[in-house]
Image: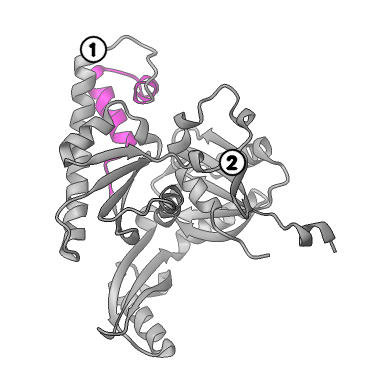
Amino acid sequence: MNILSKINPQRSTVGLDIGNHSLKLVKLIHQKNGYFLEATGIKELPPGTIEGTDIKKRDVLIDSISKLVNQCDPDITDVVIAMAGHSIISDKITFKNETDEAAEEMILWEAGQRSPFDVDDITLDYKILHRRVDANEMEVLLVAAKNDIMKNYIDLVYEAHLRPVIVDVDAFAINNCYALETADMPQDGVTALVNIGHDLTNVTFIKDGIYHSTRDISTAGDYFNKILQRNLGLSPEDAAMLIKGKNTTSFDNSKFQQSIEFAAEEMSSGIDLAFSYFKSSTKSDMIDRIILSGGGAYIPNIIDFLAKRHQTTVQVSNPLAFLQYDPGLFGNLEPESISALLTVAVGLALRKVDD
């Protein structure tokens, strides 16, 4: 028995965000007075390693995960991972109150009816969010994940000599970060958490501080890259550097701004469609604030464009500002320059894992 660990327990959780463009890892120690960031790292993946939800270069991905873990902390064994995109669907539904046993049967039956996947090919889960005794209703969050894709990722993590102790959802991890960043200042109204990834953008709606729903938009970082390639005649590598705000080649600034606005307008149209669905089930007529995360949060001028286009305030997620860490952990790098990239990984690491 480790007596010291019983006297002063410090549990840690490792979030591993497996994205199409890069891997992100965050190890948090859960303390009584908050969270300590013990290790973190980002590793870009070779192009074509993952396409959509399909792992095209399995050995390359496994090797990249192993190298990132060894870079951050070779002793890491347990990780929390997440599913995202078209492999998973989440929704909030209102049911009539029932006994717990009857409620579970009814909820899972309804989930099977609503899922676009064959019920035999999915894993279903749910959480009762609220019970309204006066209205005899309960709000339930439903989640359905495709078994084959989920198993593929779980097996991959095991092959990298890690143990996936929790399989979460990207949107919920982002919501965890939102809760962390607003813990001392709860925000009323509608918040859109817009996570701009490489292949997909997730829009998660929070109403009065409570998760409501998530919708996916196909316009993401790769779309911006392709528009810049087409309009400015750039290589994929040079376009990627420009999106990161790093000038490696001469370019027409006017065409660059127009290209960013063109791609951002396409994204905004997707946000509008997602918000239309949200409005159909609420009485909200506007988005009170947008919080950006993911690599796309750093696209030049994206904040100003979205603020003007949606007539709301826009800010970038900065979960590192709410964590304790050794300043030397980032070397000469400004934490704010990568914090939004780590949003999902931080959200996963915020999960408590039972011993």
- Residue 75 showing in the rendered view: yes
Q: Quadrant of the C terminus?
A: bottom right
Is residue 15 rendered to the left or right of residue 100?
Answer: right
Q: Secondary structure at mark 1?
A: loop
Residue at point 21%, 42% (across, down): 312
Q: Nearer the viewer, residue 6 or 235?
A: 6
Q: Which residue is mark 1?
A: 252
The residues tagged by marks 2 and 1 sit, at their Cα atoms, a distance apart of: 42 Å
Question: Neighbour class for label 1 at 10 Å: few (<14), some, many (≥20)?
Answer: few
Q: Which residue is mark 2?
A: 324
Q: Mark on residue 8?
A: none
Q: Nearer the viewer, residue 13 or 196?
A: 13
Q: Position of residue 280 (x, y in %)?
A: 16, 63
Is 154 located above or below residue 243 in the figure? below
Q: Range of the magenta residues?
A: 217-243
Is residue 216 rendered to the left or right of residue 7?
Answer: left
Nearest to N terminus: mark 2 or mark 1:
1
Secondary structure mostly seen in the magenta stretch? helix
Residue at point 35%, 89% (across, down): 98
